Each structure stands twice: as C-alpha cells, then as structure tokens.
Image: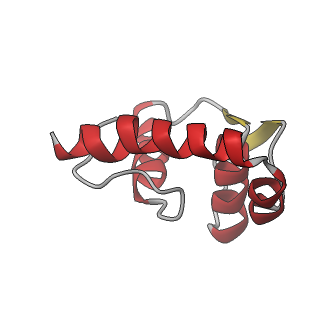
Amino acid sequence: MTSPIPFVGVEFHELSSTLERIRILYPNNSLYIIGTSLGGNYVLRYLLSHQTHHVKGLVLISPPFDVKYVIDGMNMWYQRIFIKYYLKNIILRHDQ
C-alpha cells in the first residue's frame, strides 16, 4: 500500500480502505485478519473501535497489549536501534 501519510499506527484510514475494497471485490468470501507483533495490536484496536461484520476471524501473533509497557521495558540499546530503523525506513523514505 502506498500513501502520502506515513504509517504511525494510530490512524486507521488505510486499513479501513483496504478492508472495504476486499469486501467489494470478494463479497461472498469470509475475511480473516492476521496481525503480528505491533500489527496485531493495530488490527485488534481497529476491530475494537470499528463496527465491521464482514471480518469473520482474527489471529494475533505476539501482540503487545500494553505498548507503553513494552517500550519502557526495552533496554536503551534496542530502543536506539528501533528508533534508528524507524527514522531510516519510515520517516526519511517517506520524505523522498
């Protein structure tokens, strides 16, 4: 998916659009969503906050239910690598 807006994990516009497009293209098929790690947290929050009857199932693989707790618990070395990766691959790439 491409978007002029960088992914921040708070907005759901891309996921909403994608699910709606899938529903239109495949109206007779059941839809199951799989989310891994922060993606699991993201889709769980989406489904809890949006009324959607066409999603039949959800599989979560290692989702952090309390993201702040997880980030606070990471050691500083890992946090620096994560932030450096995020800046390089998300923020800076989006600017190009």
Does 87 appear above or below 10?
A: above
Residue at the outermost front position:
77
Above or below for 27 versus 3: above
The colour style of the image is secondary structure
Q: Residue placed at 72% from the left, 51% from the top?
A: 41
Q: Residue 68: which quarter of the image?
A: bottom right
Measuring 69% from the left and 39% from the top, which residue is drawn there? 78
Quadrant that contains the N terminus: top left
Out of 37 and 31, give the one closest to the viewer. 37
For the C terminus, the image quarter is: top left
Report the front residue among 46 and 31: 46
> In the image, residue 22 lies at what x, y percent?
46, 36
Look at the picture and state if 95 lies above or below 60: below
Q: Residue at x 58, y 37 (%)?
A: 81
* Residue 45, quarter of picture: bottom right
Is 39 or 59 nearer to us in this picture? 39
Quarter holding residue 5: bottom left
Q: Foreground residue, 91 or 40?
A: 91
Q: Judge from the rendering whether residue 46 lies leftward or rightward of residue 58; answer left or right.
A: left
Q: Percent x, y for residue 70? A: 81, 54
Where in the figure is residue 71, as x and y percent of width and height?
74, 55
